[in-house]
Image: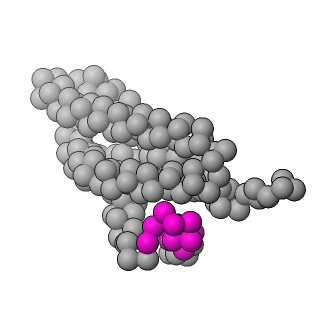
Amino acid sequence: MERRRLERSLLCRSGALNRNTTIGPAIERFDTALHELENAASLPGELAGWRKNIVAALNRLSQLWSDYLDRHGATFNAIAGQAPGLAHRTTVLREKDAQLANRLRRLREQACGIADVIAERDGSWEPRQRGSALRRELLTFVVDVRAQRAQIDNWFVEALYRDCGVAD
């Protein structure tokens, strides 16, 4: 809660966000969906039920993804406005956001594709092997999204507190 309050005040101070904009509920929903994906991916169970939970969690996360990227866009603009020297960093972070969006789309396709393998080869080792590989990719995705958010937050704070005076 304190982190969101600090982030909001920093965004308002930098001019990237006006006081009437609400970012808290959107970020909370995204965090909840990311947490649900993490829990669904890490909890073992019957493969068909597990896949159903994964697809539902990925669908919820996909619905919130554009709001998540909009928040990043405002933050990137604030970083570039406060410290033009960090424009390259925002370009790299935008590319990473695009890569994460592609990975999310691919993970949804893989999760849906496992249903066909489960139906064709029920009781075989192949569905379990694919499920295990998908589980690793999902958890890696969750870690990468959180790392991306931490990087964006760090560069945002760096841009706001960077000394750009003559004695720099």
Q: Is residue 116 above or below residue 156?
A: above
Residue 56 x, y percent position in the rendering: 22, 50
Pick out the residue farthest to the front: 166
Task: Tell me the colour scheme of the image.
Answer: one colour
In the image, what residue occupies the spot 39% across and 63% down?
27
In terms of depth relative to the viewer, which is nearer, 127 or 68?
68
* Main secondary structure along the magenta-highlighted residues: helix
- Asked if the stretch drawn in magenta spans residue 12, the answer is yes
In terms of depth relative to the viewer, which is nearer, 104 or 11?
11
Say whether residue 122 is left or right of residue 95: left
In the image, what residue occupies the spot 36% across and 59% down?
30
Q: Quadrant of residue 106?
A: top left
Residue 7 x, y percent position in the rendering: 54, 68
Residue 57 x, y percent position in the rendering: 27, 51
In the image, what residue occupies the spot 20% across and 29% down?
113
Say whether residue 54 is left or right of residue 96: left
Q: Quadrant of residue 32?
A: bottom left
In the image, what residue occupies the spot 54% across and 74% down?
9
Residue 139 x, y percent position in the rendering: 44, 42
Q: Quadrant of residue 167?
A: bottom right
Pick out the residue farthest to the right: 167
- Asked if the stretch drawn in magenta spans residue 85, the answer is no
In terms of depth relative to the viewer, which is nearer, 102 or 15?
15
Say whether residue 105 is left or right of residue 31: left
Q: Is residue 81 visible?
A: yes
Say whether residue 140 is left or right of residue 41: right
Q: Is residue 112 above or below residue 27?
A: above
Residue interval drawn in magenta: 8-18
